[in-house]
Image: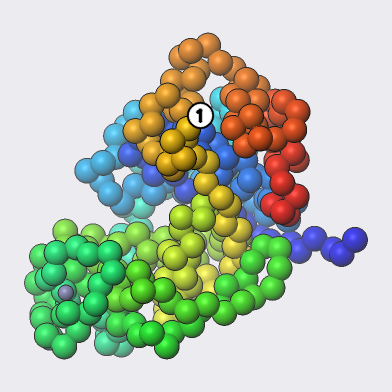
Amino acid sequence: MSQVPVFNKTRIAPTPSGYLHLGNLLSFTITAGLARRHKASILLRIDDLDQPRVRKEYVEDIFDTLEFMGIPWDEGPRNYEEYTNSWSQVHRVPLYEQGLQYLRSVKQVFACNCSRSVNYPGACLEKNLSLGVDSFNWRLRTDQSITVSITACPGTASSYSLPDSMQHFIIRKKDGNVAYQLSSVIDDSYFGVDLVVRGQDLWESTLAQVYLASLLPGNNFTETGFYHHSLLTGPDKQKLSKTAGATSIRYLRGQGENAAGIYTMLGKMLNCEGAPCNWEQLFNVLSPSVY
Ligand SMILES: [Zn+2]
């Protein structure tokens, strides 16, 4: 057998805007499994920049659920107090601001006052709107010729075009806050993350983030290995959301389920063989394509 490549660090990055659900648990299971396999440590990063949606009970649910489900992490807050004192993204706003100002200084950004649209045709590209107006988005200058190299875990690097949905993507929102793509890439580089496990729904974000990393001096995110897993869907084949109450771990615990029962339930939803009782067993019975 060929040698398993070694990574330094991966992360789990929940957003405290709802209770964690079975879809999050699947992602954590694959992250923990791949971390062990590739000798990477695990960082817990709580993505809380969208402050109006953050609630204390959702932050506490992250610690409760990880502990209840036996998901390990090596770095990051262990409780609500450590999170607010040292680990909230709020503490890293100056870093994000530095990134924004750098991109502005190298003329990679333009202001946009359009209402939000998914595929942005670049209507404001030549308008020269002022970047000093708080209520404008900042968008990145991109074009169709951009290609991004992504290293798969495990596997080799392949080249992809920046998709239409990510042309001129937003890096600073109208409310003045840095957008997810930039905060995420700055955080991952800051913490030395070199293995990212995330849902397939974030594939286009990955392309945007690796492109951003290539523009930022000293940002190592371009070297990162990625594993994009398929998403857990509900009975209606829709992606689970945080409002899907009946699949929240908290709800299942309230119904008397223990951790083993919840892993078994998740295994059934994924059509796995046997009845996995913990994340190691679930990881092992998931498709070998995971490795
Ligand atoms: Zn615009």
The relative height of residue 253 versus residue 10 in the rendered view (above or below) is above
Q: Looking at the picture, how far across and down is residue 219, in whole percent?
A: 48, 74
Outermost residue toward the top in this view: 256
Q: Residues within 10 Å of mark 1 (few under 14, many from 20)?
A: many
State the scheme by which the image is colored: rainbow
Q: Looking at the picture, how far across and down is residue 87, in whole percent?
A: 41, 47
Q: Quadrant of the N terminus?
A: bottom right
Q: Does any portion of residue 53 appear in the rendered image?
A: yes
Q: Nearer the viewer, residue 200 or 49?
A: 200
Where is mark 1, residue-wise? Answer: 65
Q: Residue at x 12, y 71 (%)?
A: 113
Q: Looking at the picture, how far across and down is residue 103, in whole percent?
A: 31, 80
The relative height of residue 11 versus residue 178 in the rendered view (above or below) is above
The relative height of residue 18 versus residue 225 in the rendered view (above or below) is above
Q: Quadrant of the C terminus?
A: bottom right
Q: Residue at x 52, y 70 (%)?
A: 221
- The kind of residue on which mark 1 rests is Thr
Outermost residue toward the right in this view: 1
Residue 182, quarter of picture:
bottom left
Q: Nearer the viewer, residue 194 or 248?
A: 248
Residue 130, quarter of picture:
bottom left
The relative height of residue 79 versus residue 4 in the rendered view (above or below) is above
Q: Does any portion of residue 263 appear in the rendered image?
A: no
Q: Residue at x 25, y 72 (%)?
A: 120
280 relative position to 79: left or right: right
Ligand 1's quadrant is: bottom left
Q: Residue at x 34, y 28 (%)?
A: 57
Q: Looking at the picture, how far across and down is residue 61, in whole percent?
A: 42, 29
Q: Nearer the viewer, residue 146 or 28?
A: 146
SS at circle 1: helix
Question: How many labels were placed on the picture?
Answer: 1
74 relative position to 291: left or right: left
